[in-house]
């Protein structure tokens, strides 16, 4: 991984590069737009052809969705310990979700009108679960189980399949446990387009959730308006910010775990201690030799890994807020003060003991979080994002009469006579 000190000539330039705003390339934008148009015009046929092209899976209109037989086979194939782990994760997710769901409320305003809000679940949502080198069982739970907790009646999952045309049994079991009512065997931008626009076989959804590769994220961006989306979560990332209290073994382990995602993942370390930085470097080398995917992780660290020696912890916090990491591991002595200064992280893990992997799989908050600097504008996935908000207003004649002078003044300012009359006529009657 790249190591940079505040004493180096290129330090300021590198720090400026950490202030990111993810933007798609023109080539990616055009490619995804073409895929979306294919699905819009050709529906199921486009899904079948694109799935064969990109995933080498030979599907038909009748096999686009997982069958009841496949669900049953998956449940029979999954070992008991896996089922217990999935249920444990879901239990914590449901408990966390319960606390973050919005509740109906009402009160009287100054004029005596009853105002309030009502929250109901979306009728039908789509959740995207990436495929690739490993089945992301935890992502099925960290999206679907939140929809389940919010009591969404129809949860449509989409995940790519390989040449076998079958979804991994453990992933399929997790999707079922997370409340999935349908599982579409299609991935990529074409899956997002199908969920947003609908086809003969795929019913449109109200909102789409979940992480994905650059094509998936760009498809979600392009289809805002046709459908609501949660956020734009791309390749995974971690930033460890630590003073001399950091444990090099724990820090190295978190950086290696993040690099295991591969692709365009980012694993960064910021510290004001040159001694700790050197110890973390040595610990990365030691632990790397013990891991089964060491070559893959090493390549990932070379591409997206960095260690930054800063002159002070104030500078470390400033850089963190510029970078807006998906996951932040904050290991400092003055934890309360530094935590209050962090403004943009998707999820924060406090202290040496707080392993990010526990948050990925079990703790309760969703691991679907903003990446690529999006934490400056978005927050991570929450249960209340599965709720539709509606405002409520109820008036009696007394409250209408009290409202009339203000409404008439606004109607005069904006030249909207009918607005003022609609209130005045009620008062007269």
Image: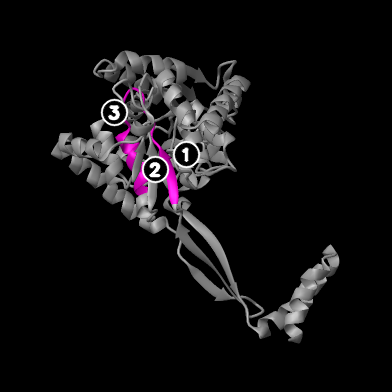
**Which mark, residue 166?**
3
In the shown orientation, is residue 393 left or right of residue 428?
A: left
In the shown orientation, is residue 85 left or right of residue 425?
A: left
Q: Is residue 129 magenta?
A: yes
**Which mark, residue 55?**
none
Query: Residue 105: horizontal and vertical position, in percent?
Result: 50, 69
Numbered disc 1: secondary structure? helix
Numbered disc 2: secondary structure? strand
Mark 1, other Cα within 10 Å: few <14 / some 14–19 / many ≥20: many
In the shown orientation, is residue 43 left or right of residue 77?
A: right
Mark 1 vs 3, N-terminal side: 3
In which quadrant is the C terminus drawn?
A: bottom right
- Total numbered labels placed on residues in the image: 3
Identify residue for label 2.
156
**Label pair 1/2, CB-CB below 8 angstroms:** yes
Query: Is 16 above or below relative to 357?
Result: above
Query: Is 349 above or below relative to 388?
Result: above
Q: Is residue 400 magenta?
A: no
């Amino acid at each position: 991984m790249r190591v940079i000190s505040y004493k180096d000539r290129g330090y300021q330039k590198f720090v400026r590069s950490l202030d990111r705003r993810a933007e798609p390339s023109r080539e990616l934008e055009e490619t995804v737009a073409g895929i979306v148009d294919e699905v819009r015009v050709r529906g199921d046929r486009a899904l079948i052809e694109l799935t064969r092209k990109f995933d080498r899976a030979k599907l038909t209109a009748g096999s686009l969705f997982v069958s009841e037989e496949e669900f049953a086979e998956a449940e029979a194939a999954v070992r008991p310990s896996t089922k217990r782990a999935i249920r444990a994760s879901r239990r914590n997710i449901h408990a966390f979700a319960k606390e973050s769901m919005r509740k109906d409320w009402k009160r009287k305003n100054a004029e005596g009108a009853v105002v309030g809000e009502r929250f109901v679940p979306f009728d039908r949502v789509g959740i995207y679960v990436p495929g690739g080198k490993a089945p992301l069982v935890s992502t099925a739970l960290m999206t679907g189980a939140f929809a389940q907790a919010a009591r969404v009646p129809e949860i449509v999952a989409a995940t790519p399949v390989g040449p076998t045309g079958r979804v991994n049994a453990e992933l399929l079991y997790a999707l079922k446990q997370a409340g999935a009512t349908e599982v579409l065997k299609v991935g990529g931008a074409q899956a997002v387009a199908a969920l947003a626009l609908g086809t003969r076989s795929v019913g449109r959804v109200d909102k789409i959730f979940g992480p994905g590769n650059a094509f998936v994220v760009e498809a979600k961006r392009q289809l805002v308006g046709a459908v609501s989306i949660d956020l734009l979560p791309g390749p995974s990332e971690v930033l460890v910010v630590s003073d001399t209290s950091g444990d090099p073994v724990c820090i190295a382990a978190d950086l290696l775990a993040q690099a295991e995602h591969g692709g365009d993942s980012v694993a960064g370390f910021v510290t004001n201690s040159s001694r700790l930085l050197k110890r973390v470097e040595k610990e990365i080398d030691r632990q790397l030799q013990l891991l089964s995917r060491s070559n893959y992780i090493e390549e990932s660290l070379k591409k997206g890994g960095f260690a930054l020696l800063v002159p002070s912890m104030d500078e470390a916090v400033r850089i963190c807020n510029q970078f807006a990491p998906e996951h932040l591991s904050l290991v400092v002595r003055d934890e309360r003060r530094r935590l209050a200064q962090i403004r943009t992280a998707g999820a924060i893990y406090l202290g040496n003991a707080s392993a990010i992997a526990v948050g990925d799989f079990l703790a309760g908050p969703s691991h679907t979080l903003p990446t690529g600097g999006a934490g400056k504008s978005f927050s991570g996935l929450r249960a209340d994002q599965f709720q539709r908000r509606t405002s409520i207003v109820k008036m009696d004649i007394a409250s209408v009469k009290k409202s009339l002078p203000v409404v008439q003044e606004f109607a005069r300012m904006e030249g909207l006579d009918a607005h003022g009359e609609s209130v005045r006529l009620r008062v007269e009657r």
